[in-house]
Amino acid sequence: MSTTLIRNGLVISATDEVTADVLVDGERVVGLLAPDSGLAGSADRVIDASGKYVIPGGVDPHTHMEMPFGGTYASDTFETGTAAAAWGGTTTIVDFAIQTVGSSLREGLDAWHAKAEGRCAVDYAFHMILSDVHEQSMKEMDILVGEGVTSFKMFMAYPGVFYSDDGKILRAMQQGTANGALTMMHAENGIAIDLLVQQALAAGRTDPRVHGDVRHALLEAEATHRAIQLARVAGSPLYVVHVSAQEAVAELAAARDAGLPVFAETCPQYLFLSTDDLAKPDFEGAKYVCSTPLRPRENQAALWRALRTDDLSVVSTDHCPFCFKGQKEMGRDDFSKIPNGMPGVENRVDLLHQAVVDGHITRRRWVELASTAPARMFGLHPRKGTLAPGADADIVVYDPHAEQVISAETHHMNVDYSAYEGKRVTGRVHTVLSRGEVIVDDGRYFGRPGRGHYLRRSTCDYL
Ligand code: URP
Ligand code: ZN
Ligand code: ZN
């Protein structure tokens, strides 16, 4: 086993900031030591982190590599998407395996294992999208929880694709109550949205900006409220994904104030982008079509506040990239045919650091939102999300003073545009270790497909 000493950085966790040396032996962290502990001479490799932050590698608990959606496939494969994640300081992803209607959970999970195995540059795990609720799939759910797939996403949106009605949602939540799984919810009233889509198209409104109008904030809030009540009836915990509307945040805050086991995430696109982007001319707005949709800028203050108060506990990316050319273009004459999703797995850690620079969150909250909380939420802690002795040595040495301009010219995601093109941010990933191996260092990449391990997860640490 070779040893690495990361010297003299400011080691930041969700709770502490301390100048220390981090000692790694093989794939694991073995200790934090007072600076200049005298071990520098005996370590096989020394990384000087003076003037830099040392943080646990990012955990992105919401990605869709190669996802079949909207008549096409998300453009990042597990190979390209996990390499891009590594460049951006994310050393673990949790992707969504899909059960399609008429298929078993096992078939869906096997298909995702086949796509990911031997291709990932960083460690990975799976949630399961549950599209077909019946007694057999409920039995399978129990088996999967035992195998480390401990969270199941359901959709109140997308009728005819992933949609489940309230009875099916309640039934699956009951199963989650019994087997310890966490129910994840895409909370938008898809039936009402589909009516508004048809009415908009009939009125000749075909632009990408209409996507934001028909996916009304109140239909996100209504679905969020309904999901919370269904979870209460089932006695189950709930995790609401990609929250964007302030009215939905209010529902979550009320539930949490009442002491319910209700959790939620938002994503950088809702914190940094808005309907102004969706309204860009010449079909450029299609780059920003995702669901839930981008909201008017006024919503952002409520999202930032909720991130500070923990009514939102996690920032994921919902990375689901589609190229502008050939993919987003499928909806040139009809916004409802634009594949839903945006790229971002490479940008999350930097954008959240920019939030520190802008004064929205503290450095410790940055680490918590990007790494520790998602690891705890999805049963990966203490292996991931911390630099405590025994944890995997997934470590980012972060330069808080470097300046960069985000651009598709320089990013590593397999998509022909950046949602943040031209945005100046302060801070940059300098070095990334994944299980003790340096995979990014000072602008050079040393990762390789297949070095990432599949992770069996425990159940949620907050319950
Ligand atoms: O627009 C989105 N969010 N695409 C990915 C699928 C989902 O609903 O998360
Ligand atoms: Zn969703
Ligand atoms: Zn998603």
Image (cartoon, helix red, strand yellow):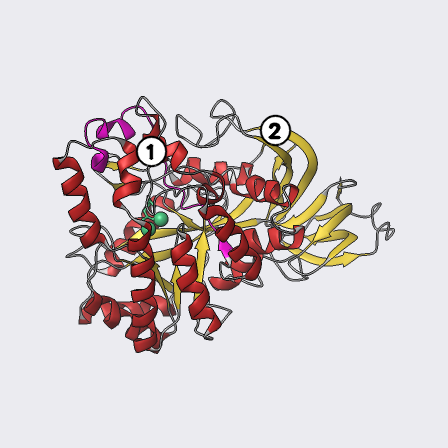
Q: In this view, does 133 lie to the left or right of 294?
A: left
Q: Residue at x 41, y 43 (%)?
A: 118
Does 164 appear in magenta? Answer: no
Q: How busy is the neighbourhood of tag 2: few (under 14 within 10 Å), some, or many (20 plus)?
A: some
Kind of element beneath mark 2: strand
Q: Is residue 156 left or right of residue 160?
A: right
Q: Is residue 385 left or right of residue 291?
A: right
Q: In this view, does 53 lie above or below 407?
A: below
Decide if ligand 1 comes within 8 Å of the CB at mark 1: no
Q: How busy is the neighbourhood of tag 1: few (under 14 within 10 Å), some, or many (20 plus)?
A: many
User: Residue 223 occupies which quadrant of the picture?
Assistant: bottom left
One can see residue 327 in this view: no
Q: Where is residue 431 in the image (x, y as percent from the top left)?
A: 65, 38
Q: Which residue is drawn at 82% across and 48% down?
A: 42
Kind of element beneath mark 1: loop
Most frequent secondary structure within the magenta stretch: loop
**Earlier residue among tags 2 and 1:** 1
Q: Is residue 280 above or below residue 158?
A: above
Q: Position of residue 236 (x, y in %)?
A: 36, 74
Q: Is residue 463 left or right of residue 390?
A: left
Q: In this orientation, which residue lies closer to the viewer: 117 or 409? A: 409
Q: Where is residue 444 in the image (x, y as percent from the top left)?
A: 61, 29
Q: In this orientation, which residue lies closer to the viewer: 450 or 339? A: 339
Query: Which mark, by number, is residue 447?
Result: none
Q: Residue at x 50, y 44 (%)?
A: 451
> Which residue lies under the disc numbered 1?
322
The magenta stretch is 314-337
Query: Which mark, by number, is residue 404?
Result: 2
- Under mark 2, the amino acid is Gln
Residues at marks 2 and 1, CA–CA distance in whole angstroms: 24 Å
Q: In this orientation, which residue lies closer to the viewer: 425 or 343? A: 425
